[in-house]
Image (cartoon, rainbow, N blue to C red):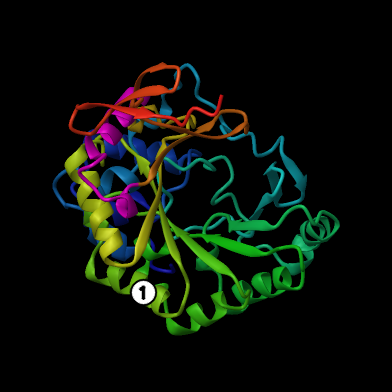
């Protein structure tokens, strides 16, 4: 983290920047969404190719200055759904606890670009006290997602303190820790960190691989270490234009994740954050990709395609329509091979 690249000069020593990248970095450094790339993740970038799928995720583009119809500063309506400082509740049974604003890499498609890297770092126990009090007063919240920023850039002691406090709230049945650290800084996944994660008796790690190139040996080892410590690992990929918007890339990614005991959970339509239109795909493209993967990839390796609706109204699963027609008890389905098959319901009339 201390050696993260955060300046134009340092980035130009590592990569041959295009004019669009150089202008994008200058814009980011003059008050836009901050630049930060760990040396490890920078090492995954192709030095010469601006279209490298890793480079597109972490190097600013001048297109980040464009504002398109539908772009939002806070696309998920998190500020409107804040129920206590650093605590957001958009669903009846779960809440999002934001414990830091720091990340190893500031991804250029970040849904919280309005706040991450804005200063303050890890939130202290006193800063989170009101959030803990709210959870104690609302036992209907049984699922807490610990996020930020990236919680795993905090120290082991801070992580254990957060999870330890949540463990004292009886109604919090399980905790999800959302982190891109296995992707951007896999050396951080140590035995001591894994032990800290086990402070709460039921912790799941939600990580964020978007391209097979990110599944380096170090990243694969980090995923296996988490699994060996008894921490289930799920992956949420973001569908990104020029990065993973083709069936072959997604197939390789999902198969690679399952091979390393990571369950592909969501394929997320990119949130309409201001400055990300150049990375977003049409919704129909995602649906077509899911149709191409259905039957080609086993169910354990096939995530749901999800749209997190603007305004914080909740996630909606979308996908191909396999029902061709219905008539009484008869439903005609289209298989992944394109065959039409009738399914007949029992007639209880």
Question: Is 41 left or right of 156, judged from the image as shown?
Answer: left
Question: Is 191 left or right of 136, judged from the image as shown?
Answer: left
Residue 145: within the magenta? no
Residue at image position (34%, 48%) is 58
Residue 290: within the magenta? yes
Give x and y (percent) for residue 119. Answer: 61, 54
**Observer-nearest of 9 and 324:** 324
Q: Quadrant of residue 263?
A: bottom left
Residue at image position (70%, 45%) is 89
Q: Main secondary structure of the magenta part?
A: helix
Q: How many marks?
A: 1
Picture layout, residue 192 above or below residue 140: below
Q: Quadrant of the C terminus?
A: top right
Q: Which residues are magenta?
A: 281-302
**Observer-nearest of 346 and 51:** 346
**Outermost residue to the right:** 137
Residue at image position (32%, 37%) is 240
Give x and y (percent) for residue 142. Answer: 70, 57
**Observer-nearest of 48 and 57:** 57
């Amino acid at each position: 983290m201390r050696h993260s690249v955060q300046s134009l000069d340092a980035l130009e020593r590592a990569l041959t920047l295009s004019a669009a990248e150089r202008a994008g970095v200058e814009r980011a450094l003059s008050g836009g969404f901050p630049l930060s790339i760990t040396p490890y993740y920078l090492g995954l970038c192709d030095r010469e190719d601006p279209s490298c799928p890793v480079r597109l995720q972490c190097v600013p583009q001048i297109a980040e200055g464009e504002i398109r119809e539908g772009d939002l500063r806070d696309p998920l309506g998190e500020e409107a759904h804040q129920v206590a400082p650093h605590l957001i509740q958009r669903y009846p049974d779960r809440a999002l606890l934001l414990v830091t604003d720091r990340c190893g890499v500031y991804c250029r498609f970040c849904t919280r670009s309005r706040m991450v890297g804005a200063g303050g770092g890890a939130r202290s126990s006193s800063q989170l006290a009101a959030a803990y009090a709210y959870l104690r007063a609302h036992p209907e919240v049984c699922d807490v997602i610990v996020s930020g920023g990236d919680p795993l850039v905090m120290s082991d002691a801070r992580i254990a303190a957060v999870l330890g406090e949540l463990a004292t709230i009886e109604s919090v049945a399980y905790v999800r820790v959302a982190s891109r650290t296995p992707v951007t800084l896999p050396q951080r996944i140590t035995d001591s960190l894994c032990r800290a994660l086990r402070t709460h008796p039921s912790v799941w790690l939600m990580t964020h691989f978007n391209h097979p190139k990110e599944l380096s040996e170090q990243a694969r080892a980090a995923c296996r270490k988490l699994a060996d410590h008894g921490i289930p690992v799920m992956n949420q990929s973001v569908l990104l234009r020029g990065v993973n918007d083709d069936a072959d890339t997604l197939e390789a990614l999902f198969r690679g994740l399952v091979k390393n005991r990571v369950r592909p959970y969501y394929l997320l339509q990119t949130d309409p954050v201001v400055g990300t239109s150049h990375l977003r795909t049409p919704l129909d493209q995602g649906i077509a990709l899911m149709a191409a993967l259905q039957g080609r990839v086993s169910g354990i390796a096939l995530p749901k395609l999800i749209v997190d609706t603007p305004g914080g109204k909740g996630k909606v699963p979308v996908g191909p329509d396999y029902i061709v027609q219905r008539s009484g008890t008869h439903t005609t389905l289209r298989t992944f091979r394109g065959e039409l098959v009738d399914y007949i319901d029992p007639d209880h009339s």
